């Protein structure tokens, strides 16, 4: 199959990610059928796509005719999963992050979709290899990890499962480019893939700072905002949802290292149901969609240097473990998946290795977490020439 043969895409699940994926596919001229378990969910997904296309018409990025053509001729919905996938060349799944549910969905897809259709999961954490056990021919199964919101974030991680063929990875890579996305290949099916994995130790640091209780989150977020970041790390945790944050850490604690075990403060917030923006209270109190942050004082102990050191240290591990093809892909991933100014390798290129090493050693001592220990390539500065 060639990229131009992908004419019909079935998107399973019409929630936050599914409707965005359907939108970028119709905008690339594909026929899309979106499926879900209730008509109201589908109607809601279509309404969101319409809203987004209306916005683009208003901005004169597309014409009203383009919008009408996409909505009336390219997009359709169905409550019947098997019927939806029966003539699709590509199936993209975006149902909730529950392994048994994903396997059940793909068992049904596998029996109903054409035998050579590409089957992709948008999972943000789960093993592609394990989900692939639910389908007949796993060489056509792969991860296609979009970032939220799909219509604005450029990155797509195209992920190999153990049995995925090179040919199919290349095909989905090309298709992602057709969607006007920036794809990077993830060569190894490993927790967090590239981008979320590099952010993982920062999540552990946030949990450790909350448990230590010595530095107010406001003071750290104030420094980050001062640097021009749209949100500080604590505000972001509330925005994403303390439940999502907690479950991701728990998953990393089971798959990567015990150091990721969510701390007692996060656990208490979970028990109280203080889940961040969506419940009006988490690390911060939220009013009218805004976190109430006191930015009058800035932390001098935890600064952007700590977060950078942790990130570049983890990026070195991602490269050494063979998860990413190149350091350039890692930087590209962080820029287009996380809206970073630059990737960790580029950001740390001008930094003294001793400063990075000292920063990491101090964090390791202060919080007792081995994941903060500096890698040898950080200590001797050779991370600056990795892959060259
Ligand atoms: N939200 C994010 O920021 C984000 C980012 C990247 C990846 N992801 C991943 O994308 C996937 C979907 O996440 P989301 O945030 O869109 O979830 P969501 O809860 O917003 O949407 C999931 C949708 O799937 C539907 N669904 C449930 N069971 C189904 C079934 N058997 N068949 C068809 N539809 C079914 C639900 O009704 C719901 O509409 C998850 O794997 C998640 O980890 C999410």
Image (cartoon, grey):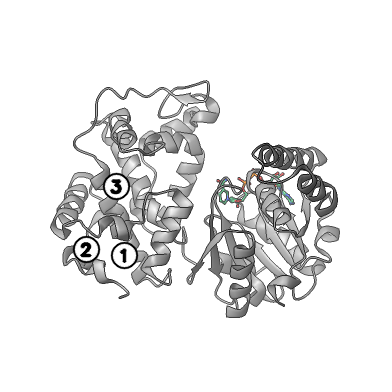
Ligand 1 under 8 Å from disc 3 Cβ: no
- Dot 2 crowding, Cα within 10 Å, few <14, some 14–19, many 20+: many
Q: Where does the image place residue 337, in percent across and percent down from the top left?
A: 48, 53
Mark 1 and mark 2 lie on one chain; the one further toward the N terminus is 1
Disc 2 + disc 3, Cβ < 8 Å: no
Height in image: 315 above or below 69?
A: below
Compare residues 225 and 45 and report the one nearer the observer.
225
The picture quadrant where one finds residue 50 is top right
Location of the C terminus (image quadrant): bottom left
- From the image, tell me which residue sits under label 2: 378
Location of the N terminus (image quadrant): bottom right
- From the image, tell me which residue sits under label 1: 316
Compare residues 273 and 147 and report the one nearer the observer.
147
Residue located 29% across and 55% down the image: 347
Q: Whole-Å distance between the Cαs marked 1 and 3?
A: 14 Å
- Dot 1 crowding, Cα within 10 Å, few <14, some 14–19, many 20+: many
Q: Where does the image place residue 379, in percent across and percent down from the top left?
A: 17, 63
The picture quadrant where one finds residue 343 is bottom left
Residue located 85% across and 47% down the image: 72
Query: At numbered mark 2, what does the secondary structure look like: helix, strand or loop?
Result: helix
Q: Is residue 270 left or right of residue 378?
A: right
Disc 1 + disc 2, Cβ < 8 Å: yes
Q: Whole-Å distance between the Cαs marked 2 and 3?
A: 14 Å
Q: Where does the image place residue 221, in percent across and percent down from the top left?
A: 33, 33
What label does residue 307 carry, if any? 3
Query: At numbered mark 3, what does the secondary structure look like: helix, strand or loop?
Result: helix
């Amino acid at each position: 199959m060639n990229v131009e043969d992908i004419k019909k895409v079935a998107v399973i699940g019409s929630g936050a990610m599914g409707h965005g994926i359907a939108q970028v596919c119709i905008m690339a001229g594909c026929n899309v059928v979106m499926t879900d378990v209730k008509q109201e969910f589908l109607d809601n997904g279509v309404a969101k796509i319409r809203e987004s296309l209306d916005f683009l018409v208003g901005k004169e990025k597309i014409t009203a005719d383009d919008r009408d053509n996409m909505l009336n001729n390219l997009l359709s919905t169905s409550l019947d999963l098997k019927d939806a996938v029966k003539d699709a060349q590509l199936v993209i799944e975006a149902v909730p992050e529950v392994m048994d549910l994903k396997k059940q969905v793909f068992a049904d897809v596998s029996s109903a979709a054409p035998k050579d259709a590409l089957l992709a999961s948008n999972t943000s954490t789960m093993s592609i290899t394990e989900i692939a056990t639910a389908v007949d021919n796993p060489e056509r199964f792969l991860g296609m990890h979009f970032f939220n919101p799909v219509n604005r974030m450029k990155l797509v991680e195209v992920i190999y499962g153990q049995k995925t063929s090179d040919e199919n990875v290349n095909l989905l890579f090309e298709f992602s480019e057709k969607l006007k996305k920036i794809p990077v290949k993830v060569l190894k099916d490993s927790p967090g893939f590239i981008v979320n994995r590099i952010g993982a130790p920062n999540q552990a640091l946030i949990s450790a700072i909350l448990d230590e209780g010595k530095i107010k989150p406001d003071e750290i977020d104030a420094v980050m905002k001062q640097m021009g970041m749209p949100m500080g790390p604590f505000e972001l945790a509330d925005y994403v949802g303390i439940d999502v944050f907690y479950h991701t850490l728990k998953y990393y604690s089971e798959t990567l290292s015990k150091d990721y075990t969510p701390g007692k403060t996060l656990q208490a917030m979970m028990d109280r149901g203080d889940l961040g923006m969506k419940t009006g209270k988490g690390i911060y109190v939220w009013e009218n969609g805004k976190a109430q942050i006191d930015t009058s004082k800035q932390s001098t102990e935890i600064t952007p240097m700590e977060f950078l050191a942790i990130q570049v240290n983890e990026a070195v591990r991602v490269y050494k473990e063979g998860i990413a093809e190149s350091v350039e892909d890692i930087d590209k991933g962080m820029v287009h998946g996380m809206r970073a100014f630059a990737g960790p390798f580029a950001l740390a290129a001008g930094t003294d290795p001793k400063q990075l090493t000292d920063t990491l050693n101090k964090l390791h001592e202060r919080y007792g977490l081995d994941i903060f220990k500096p890698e040898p390539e950080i200590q001797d500065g050779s991370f600056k020439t990795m892959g060259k």
